[in-house]
Amino acid sequence: QVELVESGGGVVPAGGSLTLSCKTSERTLNRYTVAWFRQAPGKEREFVAGFKKNNANAYAADSVKGRFIMSRDNAKNILYLQMNSLKAEDAAVYYCAADCCLISSSLRRSSEYDYWGRGTQVTVSS
């Protein structure tokens, strides 16, 4: 059982920055595929960024490339999502997720992940 707890959400003006954190209970986090997803009202949950299992390279969705940076602290078992140049369309509930065993090609598929946090709200003000 892997427990995930997101934090750091809030209200930020367009063009601003915000960093989210995801504390995990997993002591060997690098052995899990981990990712950030987001879901806006009335929309499907979408992939934001993630790390494949045993891979140090972070992958990001096209919509956030160049603006968002995902990182991880394996010693502290924490995932981060640094969000810069926020846009109105970035407003959503952000979730972190983890899975031990999904294949690499499924990184962006939310249905493949077994473990989820409860989410943290990011609101971009006009």
Image: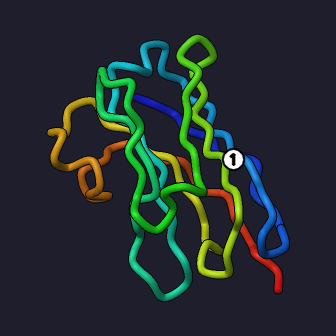
**Residue 9 x/y as whole percent:** 75, 57
Residue 48, above or below 42: above
Residue count near mark 1 (Cα–Cα under 10 Å), binned few <14, some 14–19, many ≥20? many
Residue 71, above or below 31: below
**Residue 122 x/y as whole percent:** 71, 66
Q: Residue at x 55, y 84 (%)?
A: 41
Q: Is residue 40 left or right of residue 106?
A: right
Residue 88, above or below 116: below
Q: Residue 109's quadrant in the figure? A: bottom left
In which quadrant of the rendered image does the N terminus lie?
A: top left
Q: Residue at x 65, y 74 (%)?
A: 91
Name the residue that disc number 1 marks.
Answer: 20
Q: Residue at x 63, y 32 (%)?
A: 23
Q: Secondary structure at mark 1?
A: strand
According to the image, what is the colour scheme of the structure? rainbow
**Residue 123 x/y as whole percent:** 75, 73
Q: Residue at x 59, y 21 (%)?
A: 73
Q: Residue 18's quadrant in the figure? A: bottom right
Q: Is residue 70 left or right of residue 101?
A: right
In which quadrant of the rendered image does the C terminus lie?
A: bottom right
